[in-house]
C-alpha cells in the first residue's frame, strides 16, 4: 500500500486531479478516477464518515479551516481500510481558489521513510504539506498584529520581517511540494487565460513586507494588461521564487523591478532585474540561477523548479549576471 496519495481540486471550475497513489488507497480504479466533485473520493466510506468529510469541505471553503479527519473506506472487494484525510486551501486569502489534499493509511508518518514503500518524492510532498498549517498560523498572527494602527514603527519593522520570512518559507514549501509532484510525474498544468499584469502586482504586494525590512525598493513596471496562457498556480510560484531571490540576495538601498513586455508574435516577456551582488560565472545562463555554495549563497533548486514548470506551460527562462552588477532574469510565455 502506498505511503500516501495526493489530490487537488479547483472549486471555481470543479476540476479534480487525483494521483495514482490516492486512487489505490481509496479503492478507486485509476482508469475511472473522478475528474470533479471531491465527495466522490470517499463514496466508499460509511455514511457517518462521508458526512464528516463533506462537512469538513464546507468549513474549508467557508472559513479556510484545514481538514484532518480519520475515516474508513470499503473497497470494491470488501476490504476495510482505515485512512486519514488532510486538506487545506492553497491560498488562505481565497479558500475557493484551490484545495490540496493528502490521503494516507491511518497512523502513517514521515518516519516511515525508512521503509521500502516510501519514496523520497512521497516524503518530500508530505513534509511540504505539513509545513503549510503552521506557516499560515504564523502569517495570520503577524497580519493581525500589523493591523494595529498604534503599532510603533520599530515593532512594525519586526512584523514585516516575520511576514516576509513566512511568505518566503511558504514559497519554499510550495516549491518542495511541486518538485515532488514533478518527480512522480503528477504535474498536469491547468492552462487558462491570465492577466500577467495582475499577477505581477499581486506578487509585488505579497513581497513588500520583506522588501521594506531589507530596505529594498520593489516595484512592478507594466504597460497595461498582458494576457498569457498559463497555469495560475505555477505562474505565481515562478514569479514568487524569482522576485524573492532578487530581494534576498540584494543589498540595502537596492531595487528589484518586475516588468512585463510584448515579445513578438504570440509571446509575452517577463523581466525580473535586481541590483544585488550577482556572480561571476563561467557559463552563460548560470550564476545565481543555478550555482552557488557556502553560507548565504543561493542554490539551484528554485531555478530548476521554475525552469521545469515553465516548460510545462510552453515557457522559457534565461538569466544574465555578473559579480556586483546584479541579475536579470527573462521569461517568455504564450500570449492569450
Image (spheres, rainbow, N blue to C red):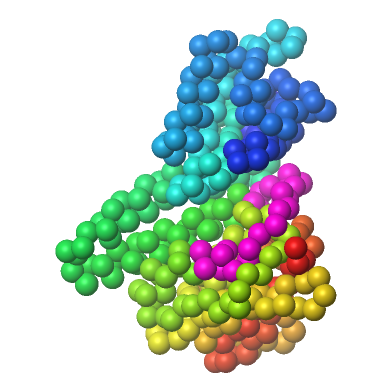
Q: Residue furthest bottom?
A: 324
Asked whether, in this view, residue 12 is left or right of residue 203, the answer is right
Please say whether residue 272 is visible from this viewpoint.
no
Against 90, residue 46 (above or below) is above
The residue lying at 51 percent from left, 80 percent from top is 256
Q: Residue at x 45, y 60 (%)?
A: 167
Q: Number of callouts in the render?
A: 0
Find out whether residue 199 is within the magenta segment.
yes
Magenta residues (range): 178-203
Residue 254 in magenta stretch: no
Answer left or right for 293 relative to 308. left
Q: List x then y, in percent, for residue 331.
A: 70, 73
Q: Quadrant of residue 10?
A: top right
**Does the image show residue 30?**
yes
Residue 267, image x, y percentages = 77, 72
- Residue 192 x %, y %: 71, 53
Which image quadrant: the C terminus? bottom right
Position of the N terminus, as image quadrant, is top right
In this view, which residue lies farthest toward the front? 224
Q: Is residue 151 left or right of residue 132?
A: left
Q: Nearer the viewer, residue 313 or 245?
A: 313
Task: Tell me where residue 12 sits by quadrant.
Answer: top right
Please state which of residues 290 and 326 is positioned toward the viewer in this rendering: 326
Residue at 70% x, 57% y is 193
Query: Is residue 295 placed above or below 189 in the rendered structure?
Result: below
Residue 31, given in percent of the width and then of the height, sits at 82, 28
In the image, residue 243 above or below residue 150 = below
Out of 179 and 159, give the one closest to the viewer.
159
Q: Residue at position x 48%, y 84% from top?
A: 255
Instruction: State whether residue 13 is above or below residue 324.
Output: above
Picture quadrant of residue 326: bottom right
Amino acid at each position: 500500500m502506498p505511503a500516501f496519495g495526493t489530490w487537488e481540486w479547483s472549486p471555481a471550475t470543479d476540476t479534480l486531479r487525483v494521483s495514482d497513489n490516492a486512487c489505490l488507497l481509496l479503492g478507486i480504479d485509476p482508469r475511472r478516477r473522478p475528474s470533479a466533485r471531491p465527495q466522490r473520493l470517499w463514496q466508499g466510506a460509511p455514511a457517518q464518515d462521508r458526512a464528516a468529510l463533506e462537512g469538513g469541505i464546507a468549513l474549508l471553503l467557508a472559513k479556510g479551516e484545514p481538514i484532518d479527519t480519520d475515516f474508513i473506506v470499503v473497497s470494491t472487494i470488501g476490504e476495510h481500510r482505515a485512512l486519514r484525510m488532510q486538506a487545506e486551501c492553497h491560498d488562505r486569502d481565497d479558500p475557493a481558489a484551490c484545495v490540496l489534499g493528502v490521503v494516507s493509511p491511518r497512523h502513517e508518518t514521515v518516519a516511515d521513510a525508512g521503509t521500502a514503500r516510501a519514496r523520497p518524492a512521497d516524503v518530500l510532498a508530505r513534509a511540504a504539506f505539513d509545513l503549510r498549517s503552521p506557516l499560515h498560523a504564523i502569517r495570520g498572527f503577524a497580519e493581525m498584529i500589523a493591523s494595529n494602527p498604534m503599532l510603533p514603527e520599530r515593532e512594525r519593522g519586526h512584523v514585516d520581517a516575520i511576514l516576509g520570512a513566512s511568505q518566503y518559507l511558504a514559497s519554499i514549501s510550495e516549491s518542495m511540494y511541486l518538485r515532488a509532484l514533478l518527480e512522480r510525474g503528477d504535474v498536469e498544468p491547468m492552462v487558462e487565460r491570465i492577466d500577467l499584469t495582475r499577477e505581477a502586482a499581486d506578487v509585488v504586494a505579497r513581497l513588500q513586507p520583506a522588501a521594506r525590512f531589507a530596505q529594498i525598493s520593489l516595484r512592478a513596471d507594466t504597460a497595461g494588461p498582458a494576457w498569457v496562457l498559463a497555469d495560475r498556480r505555477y505562474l505565481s510560484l515562478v514569479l514568487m521564487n524569482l522576485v524573492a531571490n532578487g530581494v534576498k540576495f540584494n543589498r540595502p538601498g537596492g531595487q528589484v523591478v518586475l516588468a512585463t513586455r510584448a515579445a513578438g508574435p504570440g509571446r509575452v516577456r517577463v523581466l525580473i532585474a535586481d541590483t544585488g551582488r550577482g556572480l561571476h560565472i563561467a557559463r552563460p545562463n548560470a550564476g545565481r540561477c543555478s550555482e552557488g555554495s557556502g553560507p548565504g549563497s543561493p542554490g539551484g533548486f528554485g531555478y530548476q523548479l521554475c525552469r521545469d514548470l515553465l516548460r510545462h506551460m510552453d515557457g522559457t527562462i534565461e538569466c544574465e549576471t555578473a559579480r556586483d552588477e546584479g541579475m536579470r532574469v527573462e521569461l517568455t510565455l504564450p500570449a492569450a
